[in-house]
């Protein structure tokens, strides 16, 4: 069950981060003028409600699977998946959040460019997590159950 939940959460975050990378973050460049600060603030508030619970659940499940990998799943796979999640979290906390904070002060083209460029780290990490999650699920599906 944990492997399925892990795959669902990683897949959700992967789809979301690709949408953010390709559609949402580039659109920040089009929001100029006095409304840009309000747009940035609304983005932060709304995004927190969408991604916060999913990211927390994903972290709990990833730790659980890394500590106690299911039978048949090589231990290195969930550990690498957890390391990728740590990369995504650190990139969020140390790179993306400070850039979002800067945008509260108004439109800044260089900050937006850094936001888009830096987000590739998270996009790659979550994409790789989804692939590893699918691999773990595939391993479990191929593992015979019982006698």
Image: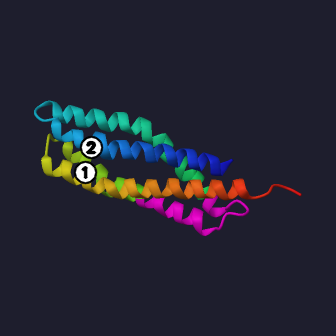
Whether residues under marks 1 and 2 lie with C-beta atoms below 8 angstroms apart, the answer is: yes
Most foreground residue, 125 or 131: 131
Report the number of numbered marks.
2
Residue displayed at 57% across by 51% down? 60
Give x and y (percent) for residue 85. Answer: 47, 57
Residue displayed at 30% across by 45% down? 22
Quadrant of the drawing holding the C terminus? bottom right
Check the image and report above or below for 72 versus 106: below
Extreme residue toward the front, this view: 142
Q: Would you identify the image quadrant in which residue 29 lies?
A: top left
Q: CA distance from mark 1 to mark 2?
A: 7 Å
Extreme residue toward the left, this view: 33
Image position of 144 (left or right of 105): right
Check the image and report above or below for 135 versus 17: below
Residue displayed at 59% across by 51% down? 61
Q: Residues within 10 Å of mark 1 (few under 14, many from 20)?
A: many
Residue displayed at 45% across by 54% down? 127
The residue indicated by pointer 1 is 115
User: In what element is the residue under mark 1?
Assistant: helix
Give x and y (percent) for residue 65. Answer: 63, 58
**Is residue 103 in view from this perspective?**
yes
Check the image and report above or below for 103 versus 45: below
* Residue 20 in magenta stretch: no
The label on residue 25 is 2
**Image colouring:** rainbow
* Residue 78 in magenta stretch: yes
The segment highlighted magenta reads 65-87
**Is residue 56 in view from this perspective?**
no
């Amino acid at each position: 069950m944990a492997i399925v939940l892990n795959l669902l959460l990683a897949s959700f975050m992967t789809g979301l981060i690709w949408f953010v990378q390709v559609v949402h973050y580039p659109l920040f460049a089009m929001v100029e003028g006095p409304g840009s600060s309000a747009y940035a603030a609304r983005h932060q508030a709304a995004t927190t409600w969408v991604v916060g619970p999913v990211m927390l659940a994903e972290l709990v499940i990833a730790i659980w699977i890394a500590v106690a990998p299911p039978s048949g799943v090589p231990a290195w796979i969930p550990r690498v998946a957890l390391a990728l999640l740590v990369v995504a979290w650190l990139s969020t906390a140390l790179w993306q959040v400070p850039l979002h904070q800067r945008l509260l002060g108004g439109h800044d083209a260089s900050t937006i460019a850094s936001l888009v460029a830096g987000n590739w780290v998270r996009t790659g990490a979550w994409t790789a997590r989804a692939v590893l999650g699918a691999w773990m699920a595939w391993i479990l599906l191929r593992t015979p159950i019982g006698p």
